[in-house]
Image: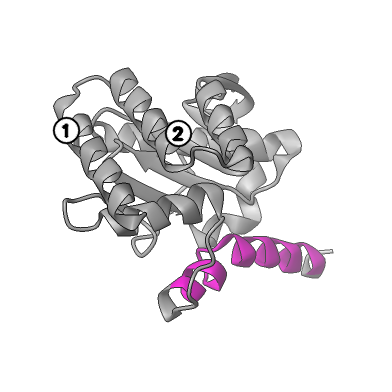
Amino acid sequence: MSTQRNELINTYRQKIKSANKELAKKEIFKDLLNRLYSGEKEIENIIDKITGGAEKTILNIPRKDKMHKGSADTLYNKIIIEFENDLKITGKHAKEQLAGYFLGQFNSGEGYNFTLIASDFITWKVYAPDVSQLDKLESLTEDKLILNEIKTASFTLSENNSEDFYFWLDRFLFKEEKQKATLKRIEEAFGYQSNVFIESFREMTSHFNR
């Protein structure tokens, strides 16, 4: 099974590198997910959300002057993904978009337990709000929100790590496979850039400020 899986992912990587449009790359990615998780109904439902969630409207994105509406390329469950054709060229834009979408969700009462990902389908960068701003998210505009990359969680697909990519996808998008507890994963799950820390920090700050 792992050999077939690796072949699918290697074929996917080659197709992505040959494609030059974001929409074409997105279709290649969806096709990979359908092939990897064929027959798994619950995951197929998530894939449908990814497919159907493109350009979903998000209200209350705070900008410099007024509130706007925006659209995230993919928004489902507690994950926001901003897809770009090439992060080397438009990575800054993707990061700014994620900041706006995150604040839009937060200000709409959706909380702050989000996984924020920018991707060009080869490189996948995971971001979290800067810890120094966690107690003032309500007052920030997207140009002021600092998002820090969680480098230990980010991933770049190569010809030598297709198996790792499968487990990365599963971990961040589907969370189906049990993962071995390593120091790196514990830090990502509970460290200062984790959703657990962010939620706990904000609750404690709110309590002591009463």
Q: Quadrant of residue 34?
A: top left
Q: Main secondary structure of the magenta part?
A: helix
Q: Return the residue found at the far bottom.
A: 183
Q: Is residue 28 left or right of residue 47?
A: left
Q: Quadrant of the N terminus?
A: bottom left
Please tell me whether mark 1 sits on a helix, a strand or a loop: helix
Q: Quadrant of residue 92?
A: top left
Label 2 sits on residue = 34
Which mark is on residue 112? none
Q: Measuring 57% from the left and 21% from the top, which residue is drawn there?
A: 56
Query: Marks 1/2: CA distance?
Result: 19 Å
Stretch of the chain drawn in magenta: 185-207
Q: Amino acid at mark 2?
A: Asn
Label 1 sits on residue = 17
Q: Specify whether residue 147 is in view.
A: no
Q: Nearer the viewer, mark 1 or mark 2?
A: 2
Residue 5 percent location from the top left of the image = 33, 49
- Between 7 and 138, the one lying in front of the other is 7
Residue 152 percent location from the top left of the image = 36, 65
Q: Is residue 198 above or below residue 106?
A: below
- Between 128 and 171, the one lying in front of the other is 171
Q: Quadrant of the C terminus?
A: bottom right
Q: Is residue 34 left or right of residue 10?
A: right
Residue 129 percent location from the top left of the image = 50, 53
N-term-proximal mark, 1 vs 2:
1
Residue 187 percent location from the top left of the image = 48, 74
Q: Amino acid at mark 1?
A: Lys
Are there few (<14), some (14-19), or many (20+) residues within 10 Å of tag 1?
Answer: few
Q: Return the residue found at the far right.
A: 210
Please tell me whether mark 2 sits on a helix, a strand or a loop: helix
Q: Is residue 96 above or below residue 59?
A: below
Q: Is residue 192 above or below residue 148?
A: below
